[in-house]
Structure formats: C-alpha cells, structure tokens
C-alpha cells in the first residue's frame, strides 16, 4: 500500500525558514516523479514544485522560485522541501504527491494528508 | 504558463442527476496532458481522470472525461451522495503545472 506522510509544518515568522519532509513507503521511491502542492486556507490547489526520480531535474512555480528547494533522498525514501524567506502568502497545507511514472508528463496518483505551514508574526 | 478556467464555480444538483463540469485552457494542451481531481473537505485530492479521458485506478465508470485542445469536460453520469465535493482540473504537460480554480458540486 502506498503511503505518504508529510511532516515539518509549523508556525513560523515572516522571513523565516522551514524544511518539510515526506516519508514514502509501499512503492519503489526512486522510480517516480514526486511533487509538492499547497492549498491556502479556504482556497484552491496550487502546484509548488516537482522532482524527477533521480533528483536530477527539478521544477518550480514562479511564486516560489529562488526561495524554495525541492530534494529527495532515495536511500531513505524521503522527499524534502526547503522553504526560505517565507511570506504570509505561503501559509497553506502542503501536500506531497507521487506521480504515475518517472516522467514529468504524468498526473499525481497518490497524495499524503498534508502538513500545515502558517507564516505569521 | 497555461491558465485553466473552470465553470461553473458551483453546481447545485440532486443525487441521480448528471453533472457536467468544464475546464478551458488559455492555450492548447499538449497531448491532452489534463487531469481531474476530486477533493472532499479535510481530505487530500484524489486522481479521477488523466490524459483527459483515462480513468484512474478504482474510479467508478460513472466518471468520464472528454475533450482536447483547449476545452475539456468531466461528466458524472449519475451523482451518488459521495460525489458531492470540489473538482479541479490540472495541466501537467509543461515546465510548470497549473490547476483550475475548482468547481464545487453541492446538493
């Protein structure tokens, strides 16, 4: 059974940094693209970032480019999102998701339950 | 970046009725890289349709997707009580991925 468990969400002040993690199990982690998607309170879904199975290719939404860094540790089946220079508008539930294949041209077929990041003073 | 516009914003229907949800892209979607997701309150999204018309694993056949180019449709043939939720379309074929703003299907 595929399981994705996010952690690391917290209340953080504007300008601060936070590192989210996603522990994966039930599939061969290195064989799949992984992504982060966020959802601000009461709002819709927003794609944040994605990474290829090897970690060699990364993709970012314009809203987070230069501030967020996605990475993965295939030896530990873990996905990370390093978030720097956080802003109030980064407040959201952050979901990690597994894609259908190790190709950028696939949808996300499994999702974690999310971790809440609140940026506020 | 492709912008996806979903309509209507809210769809008020009864169980047993047919639901038709629209997703329009600002430019042609390459190779129909278009997905539909369902999200219920307090839950993570669930993949329903990928490639514009292929049902994901374990998705009932009352859900169907169609369309190409810039116009896509999600149809729920007969609404079940558990289908009342928010539905999002997503383009996943470019260097960045985008979601539509969502359509709420309510009783």
Image: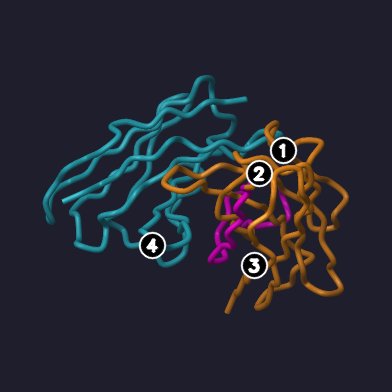
For label 2, the crowd category at 10 Å Cα-Cα, with few meaning under 14, some 14 to 19 and many 20 or more, is: many
Q: Secondary structure at mark 1?
A: loop
Q: Relative to B89, is A84 on the left or the right?
A: right
Q: Which residue is mark 1?
A: A64
Q: Secondary structure at mark 3?
A: strand
Q: Which residue is mark 2?
A: A48
Q: Which chain is cyan?
A: B
To which quarter of the image does residue A24 belong?
A: bottom right
Q: Which mark is residue B19?
A: none
What segment is highlighted magenta in the picture?
Answer: A99-120
Residue A110 sits inside the magenta stretch: yes
| Residue B42: x %, y % from top left | 41, 62
Q: Which mark is residue A6?
A: 3
Q: Relative to B95, is B34 on the left or the right?
A: left
**Is label 3 in contact with label 2 (beta carbons under 8 Å)?**
no
4 and 1 marks on the same chain: no
Q: Earlier in the sequence, mark 1 or mark 3?
A: 3
| Residue B40: x %, y % from top left | 36, 58
Query: Residue at (44%, 50%) from the top-left corner?
Result: B37
Q: Which residue is mark 4?
A: B59
């Amino acid at each position: 059974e595929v399981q994705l468990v996010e952690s690391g969400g917290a209340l953080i002040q504007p300008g601060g940094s936070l590192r989210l993690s996603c522990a994966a199990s039930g599939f061969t982690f290195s064989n799949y693209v992984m992504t982060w998607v966020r959802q601000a309170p009461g709002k819709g879904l927003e794609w944040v970032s994605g990474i290829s199975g090897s970690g060699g290719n990364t993709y970012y939404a314009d809203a987070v480019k230069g501030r967020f860094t996605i990475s993965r540790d295939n030896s530990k089946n873990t996905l990370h999102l390093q978030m720097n220079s956080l802003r109030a508008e980064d407040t959201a539930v952050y979901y990690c998701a597994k894609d259908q294949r190790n190709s950028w041209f696939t949808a996300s077929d499994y999702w974690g339950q999310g971790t809440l990041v609140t940026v506020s003073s | 970046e492709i912008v996806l516009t979903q309509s209507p914003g809210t769809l008020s229907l009864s169980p047993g009725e047919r639901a038709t949800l629209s997703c329009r892209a600002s430019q042609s979607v390459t190779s129909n890289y278009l997905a539909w997701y369902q999200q219920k309150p307090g839950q993570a999204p669930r993949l329903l349709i990928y490639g514009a018309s292929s049902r994901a694993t374990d998705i009932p056949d009352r859900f169907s997707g169609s369309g190409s180019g810039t116009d896509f449709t999600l149809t729920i043939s007969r609404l079940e009580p558990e289908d009342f939720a928010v539905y999002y379309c997503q383009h996943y074929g470019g260097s960045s991925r985008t979601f539509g703003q969502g359509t709420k299907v309510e009783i």
